[in-house]
Amino acid sequence: MTLEAIEHETGPAPRASVIILHGLGADGNDFVPVAHELDLTAVGPVRFVFPHAPTRPVTINGGYVMRAWYDILGLDSHLQREDEAGLRESQALVEALITREKARGVPAGRIVLAGFSQGCAMTLMTGLRHDERLAGLVGLSGYLPLAAKAEAERHAANRDTPIFLAHGTSDPMIPIARGRQSRDALVALGHPVEWHEYPMPHSICAAEIADLDRWLLGVLA
């Protein structure tokens, strides 16, 4: 199964791809405006892919069915039971998106995987385990899922892949402490992480987009 996705190409025959995974309850449309604010002209034509997550009941929202990469069972991260089955199902869907980009002529080393909140979790879940080196991983306002299994399951191919992590200091949904914890776990495993904090809630800000633009130009240069 290949997920439905919105696509935007900055020119013919894209030489790089950026796959952006949305957060809980949103869809692919959520990050189209952000992509339009990025200027990657120096890289050449880029294809942005904005997939829509599958729909599923979400426990924390009373079982209401919405777009979600996996179920959220509770917000207390210390007691949190993670939806491992859902995470692994969506990992396979994201892998299929990477495979499709390669089939369309963009090598793994020219593909950036990015995501916000749940999409950040899926980016780290999939990117660390992918069997070919990707250009980079971007995690915005999220965390490292199945953190205890990351070391055993990560693939050597992506041990030195650049990772851009950013978080709001007043995030009420995913507290910044959880973001820092995820950063520290990745750094402890030897991953090259560029970390940013911004005075914002669970959202995106202009300074963050500017920092991300600079970083993307670097990893796709």
Image (spheres, rainbow, N blue to C red):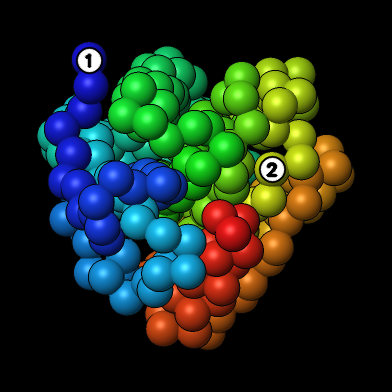
Residue position for label 1: 1
Circle 2 Cα neighbour tier, 10 Å, few/some/many (<14 / 14–19 / ≥20): many
Per the image, label 1 sits on a secondary structure element best described as loop
Q: Earlier in the sequence, mark 1 or mark 2?
A: 1
Q: Is residue 105 or residue 94 the one in the foreground? A: 105
Query: Residue 37 lies in what quarter of the image?
Result: bottom left
Q: Residue at x 48, y 61 (%)?
A: 43
Q: Is residue 168 or residue 40 the one in the foreground? A: 40
Pinpoint residue 69: horizontal percent, then vertical percent. 33, 34
Q: Quadrant of the N terminus?
A: top left
Q: Is residue 176 or residue 8 the one in the foreground? A: 8
Per the model, the C-alpha gap separating discs 1 and 2 is 27 Å
Q: Residue at x 61, y 75 (%)?
A: 197
Query: Residue 79 lies in what quarter of the image?
Result: top right
Which mark lies nearer to you, 1 or 2?
2
Pinpoint residue 134: horizontal percent, then vertical percent. 58, 37
Q: Which mark is residue 161?
A: 2
* Vertical comparison of 38 with 97: above or below: below
Per the image, label 2 sits on a secondary structure element best described as loop
Q: Residue at x 17, y 55 (%)?
A: 29
Pinpoint residue 140: horizontal percent, then vertical percent. 49, 59
Circle 1 Cα neighbour tier, 10 Å, few/some/many (<14 / 14–19 / ≥20): few
Pinpoint residue 100: horizontal percent, then vertical percent. 32, 25
Q: Quadrant of the C terminus?
A: bottom right
Left/right placement of residue 164 relative to residue 69 reads right
Q: Amino acid at mark 1?
A: Met
Q: Amino acid at mark 2?
A: Thr
